[in-house]
Image (cartoon, helix red, strand yellow):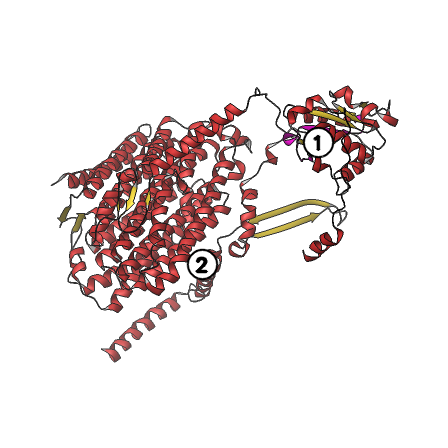
Amino acid sequence: MISLLRKMRKTGRVAEPAPEPAAGDTVPAAAELGGSVQIRHIDAGSCNGCEVEIASAFGPVYDAERYGARLVASPRHADALLVTGPVTRNMEVALRRTHEAVPEPRLVIALGDCARDCGVFAGAYGVAGAVKDVLPVDAEVPGCPPKPEAIVEALRGLTGR
Amino acid sequence: MNAAGASLLSALGLCLVSALAGATAPRRVRPLLAGLGTACAGAAAAAAGVAALAGQSWSAWLPGVLPLAGARLALDPLGGMFVAVTGAVAVCAAVYGIGYAKHGVDGRVTQATLPLFLGAMLLVPVAASVSTLLVAWELMAVTSLLLVLAEHARRPAVAEAGLWYAVMTHLGFAAIVAGMAGFAAGAAGESFEQLRAATLSPAVRDAVFVATLAGFASKAGIVPLHVWLARAHPEAPSPVSALMSAAMVNMGVYGIVRVGLDLLRGGPSWWWLVVLAMGALSALFGILQAAVASDLKRLLGYSTTENMGLVLIGVGAAGFFASCGDKELAGLALVAALLHVVNHAGFKTLLFLAAGSVLRATGTRDLDALGGLRGRMPYTTALFAVGALAASALPPGNGFVSEWLLLQSLIHALPTSGVAGAVTMPPAVGVIALSAGLAIATFVKAFGVGFLARARTPAAGRAAESPPTMICGMALAAACCVALALAPAAVLPALSHLVAVLLPGHEAVGGVVTLRLADVQGTMSPLLIAAALAVAAALLLGSVRLVARRARRPARLWDCGAGPMTPRMEYTATSFAEPLQRVFDNVLAPESDLAVTPTKESAYLVESIHYRARIPDRIERRLYDPVLAAAASIGRGATRLANGSIHRYLAYGFYALTGVLLVLAVVW
């Protein structure tokens, strides 16, 4: 406990200063959420590269939570789904059910090239399609994997902060 | 003869008539006749008790009924309260029993014994001499034993429970006989008036009190004499369980109050501190065992031990305050204890009857095999919920009122009761608070796991609602609980008056809508609390309706996108209680064994795993098992004395006779 406190004192604040919000990139459907977006992440068949970048986007350096975005543990608590990877056949039904479980208004973010258009997995036998083939997508983040800065910027587009 | 006496005698007469009907009527109408007769007897007894509480007293001497001394009966307010409670419980149980009897308990012996059991229970509080009390007590023990054994042909556990009960109740009886005989020997006679007038030496008084306390406490299921209760109450047919758990155990409390506070006129403070300590131990141990029990009726049995413990805390505190000279607090504590007796009788009747309804519908008492009864047995579920709320001592249940009164009397003890009070009362308050908290966990478990969610076994899934007579019996008990919860002022003045007679003083609790304590700062209004809760719930629902503008949308139960979910994934009673069991690991000492059987071909391949976990009654394990083992080994050793040789037996006779003659020749 003491060593943890000492570590905290020694490390200090590592978060990068907040960049100016990019203008014009906001999602109109997110306006009703009032700047607080609870996010449930779903791996629909990702290689886990995107997950590493999401982890750093919500880590101490990029600290996406200061803009009002938060990862939650259940779709019942969520406003938005953050989907990574191409939608594999095994995950298609689960993805639909998860979307069904989110209370309205609900948003879907397709994160990474695979989620946007199947990326290198396009046409593979186990892939059912991109996220937009299964669910209505509200926001997309390009990149393979997308940089944490890009993820944070897309989330700021939802929260409007 | 006044109304009280007339209705008491008609109740006893009705008991005999129903016993006769139970013994002779054909099987088809037997439960109906015996049940109706018993219910009428119960109603008459309740009327007699209420009349006695209202101030009518009645006494009779029937010289021909018992040899030598005759039977002496007297109905006073204290006895009247217990007669009224017993009668009311009997009405519910008898009406319920009409429908329940088809469940295999419509035999002649059972149907004839039940009214006799009621009659014996009515005789105990009206007995006014030692011999009458002892005869009624033994009659009550024997008839209840017969009823416990009613289903012995179906389950082997019944016989074992019956054996435990028979031994424990007779050990208790022996203690009471010893105590009362010693008391009567020191007095001018054996009637209660003569006992009251007796002047005994302090040592004799101590011995009388300790002996009778042991006997009466064993009947009340007080730790460490409770081991029979958690066995016998679950194995008895459910109406009998209700009668035993809600009415018979009260007789133990009656005995302690009658002998300690009435006949002996109070005593030194250590008597009452012992009573209080036994009560505190029972309250904690009982509710802990109930919290981890997964057999529904065993859980209720342990809850009886807890509630009798709470009552004894009140009785002990009352005696202790009286010995300190604080009559006002003593009166308050005794009123609280007696009110808890009444409340406990109400909700325990309801809970045992509802448990019997579940047992009849599903064939099991195991909470881990129940669940999903809400849709299939809506009335039983709703009635059990009322009982569970009452038993958790939360407002607006009736258990809350008496526990609140009890806490008030203990909390206000500090300034007056000296060092002993300052040391004992705060832990007693803590015990009551802890047992109330554990009771909530226990009854959330019993109701949530037993009735809600989905059925865990096909048997629970096929359950059907009970017949109207059974629901009627339960509904009567539930109505009593609700009435006691909302308007305790209906019974409190009578109880205050009875206590004011017993411990001379003025009435401890007054008020109609708001209860006002006479001698300490304290007011509480159960009716207003219930109204406030109802208004708060209505406001909450209304505001949610107002705020939620979006239309409702039916959605699939969230199963992590997989599914379907099975009843195997539900919380069971065991898993619900597991955190509690972990916290109280040192007290409960749970046992588990794991047996892994490998396949023949390789020791690394597992064929089967058997896991068995149980929480034995630790007091039974530590206190009773060694005694039983010693008795068994002595018995085995004694077989060497009786080896079947007739010569040896003749020699025993010869040596015994000459030995006695020698002793007589020397001593005489």
Q: Which mark is residue A161?
A: 1
Under circle 1, the secondary element is loop
Asked whether residue A26 appears in the rendered view, the answer is yes
Residue A119, position as x, y percentages in the image: 86, 26
- Dot 2 alpha-carbon crowd within 10 angstroms: few under 14, some 14 to 19, many 20 or more: some
Q: Quadrant of residue B213?
A: bottom left
- Dot 1 alpha-carbon crowd within 10 angstroms: few under 14, some 14 to 19, many 20 or more: some
Q: Which mark is residue B624?
A: 2
Q: Quadrant of residue A160?
A: top right
Above or below — where is A148 with respect to B205? above
Residue B288, position as x, y percentages in the image: 47, 50
Above or below — where is B548 with respect to B442? above
Above or below — where is B287 with respect to B238? below
Is B260 displayed left or right of A84 in the figure?
left
Under circle 2, the secondary element is helix
Question: Looking at the image, which residue sits at the far bottom?
Answer: B666
Q: In the image, what residue type sits under mark 1? A: Arg
Q: Could you give the CA–CA distance between mark 1 and mark 2, rounded to whole angstroms?
A: 71 Å
Query: Mark 1 against mark 2, which lies toward the viewer?
Result: 1
Q: Is residue B581 magenta?
A: no
Residue B580, position as x, y percentages in the image: 53, 48
Looking at the picture, tell me which residue is in the foreground, A138 or B281.
A138
Q: Is residue A75 magenta?
A: yes
Is B74 displayed left or right of B475 in the figure?
left
On the same chain, marks 1 and 2? The answer is no
Q: In the image, what residue type sits under mark 2? A: Tyr
The chain containing the residue under callout 1 comes to: A
Above or below — where is A109 with respect to A58? above
The chain containing the residue under callout 2 comes to: B
Q: Find the magenta span and give its range.
A: A69-87
Q: Residue at x 45, y 59 (%)?
A: B624
Figure quadrant of the C terminus of chain B: bottom left
